[in-house]
Image: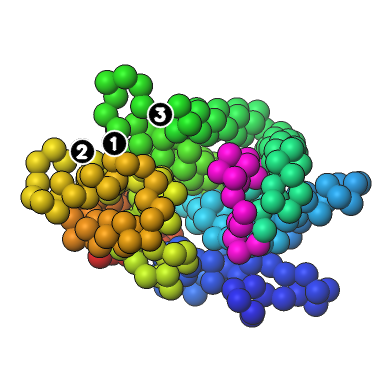
Amino acid sequence: MVGGVVRTDDGGSIASGARAVTSIGIDIVDPRLQASVERVMAMVESELRDCVFSADPFVTEAARHLVEAGGKRFRPLLVALGAHFGDPGSPLVVPAAVVMELTHLATLYHDDVMDEALVRRGAPSANSRWTNSVAILVGDYLFARAADLAADLGIEAVRLQARTFARLVHGQIAETVGPQAGEPSVDHYLQVIGDKTGSLIATSARFGGMFGGAAPEHVEALAGYGEIIGVAFQLSDDLLDIASESAQSGKTPGTDLREGVPTLPVLYALGDDDGDAAARRLREILAAGPVTDDDLHAEALGLLRESPALKRARETVRSYAEDARARLAPLPSGGPRRAMESLCDFIADRTN
């Protein structure tokens, strides 16, 4: 294993199920469950590469760009775990996981164009390596490949994938346009995260239960868990950007602050009309927009780390994590449920 990747005999690579599970905070104690999840993840990795192949070598290269860059593979992992509430050996589980990851990857190509990103997963973004037009078209190609694969799973899978995609687009539009008149900024932000992040993670967990043959009530519980845990994970990333050091978050602290991204702690700070002199000074800095000056950035980051806004944001994350845990109550106890509960613990604790 090198850098979280298992090298294969033919010179290719597959994401390590064990490393991927650990990287997002899912603790699998049962070795049989661990082995089963790793088998699914290895097959997903192989299928991903096959699915993005094109007769045009350039399209293949561009489409494999982010596949080969790696990633957490959070969505396929939830498909794999969700399938263990039924039959994880069902031949539909791996294709269902691939549909979810292809859909996610497609959104990343489009996101990088909108954000004018230069790097994605430690590699040059597709738009910076080629052009915005190529990145958009490759994203479209991946959406099409996902839909094609979903068709093999049945009409319900096609419908769910399409509706999930619609929510993703709604979320992106809402984020781009901003809150409507009179809409609280925090409510708007949470809705955007639910649409952009929670929706696909919810469908991933649902697909695991569906195509593993779980009972309908268990499928619904999995979908509810996926929605909430997806929002919780994104919110915890917001906090890590402020509260952590580079080694923990994987990026320079305060990147969102420097880029003017209004994350939850910032929105709480801006919405606090009272407070002491430190809170007023923090609002003054944040209200001016992106904090690009190094001295102001350091000051704002320090004030945020000591602010009631950060404490309130931590409480919000913990509330979502506990809500996600509650959604698991209808599921039978055992290794798969414990693994999903461990993610709730990880998210609740990772920003303290």
Report helix, strand or loop for mark 3.
Answer: loop
Report helix, strand or loop for mark 1.
Answer: helix
Mark linked to residue 258: none
Residue at image coords 31%, 19%: 181
Q: Which residue is nearer to you in this view: 34 or 64?
A: 64
Going by the numbered disc 3, the residue's amino acid type is Gly
Confirm or deny contact between disc 1 and disc 2 (CB under 8 A).
yes
Residue at image coords 42%, 70%: 246
Point out the tag, 1 or 2, that comes first from the N-terminus: 1
Magenta-highlighted residues: 106-123
In three-dimensional space, the C-alpha distance between marks 3 and 2, rounded to whole angstroms, equals 16 Å
Going by the numbered disc 1, the residue's amino acid type is Val
Q: Residues within 10 Å of mark 1 (few under 14, many from 20)?
A: some
Q: Is residue 335 above or below residue 163?
A: below
Which quadrant holds residue 352? bottom left
Q: Is residue 114 magenta?
A: yes
Point out the tag, 3 or 2, that comes first from the N-terminus: 3
> On the rendered structure, is 285 left or right of 21?
left
Going by the numbered disc 2, the residue's amino acid type is Gly
Q: Which residue is nearer to you in this view: 53 or 278?
A: 278
Which quadrant holds residue 153? top right
Mark linked to residue 186: 1
Mark linked to residue 271: 2
Q: Can you give x and y, in whole percent of width and height, for residue 233 in the image? A: 39, 53
Residue on which the image places disc 3 = 178
Q: Can you give x and y, in whole percent of width and height, for residue 132 in the image? A: 70, 41
In three-dimensional space, the C-alpha distance between marks 1 and 2, rounded to whole angstroms, equals 9 Å
Q: Is residue 261 above or below residue 180?
A: below
Confirm or deny contact between disc 3 and disc 1 (CB under 8 A).
no
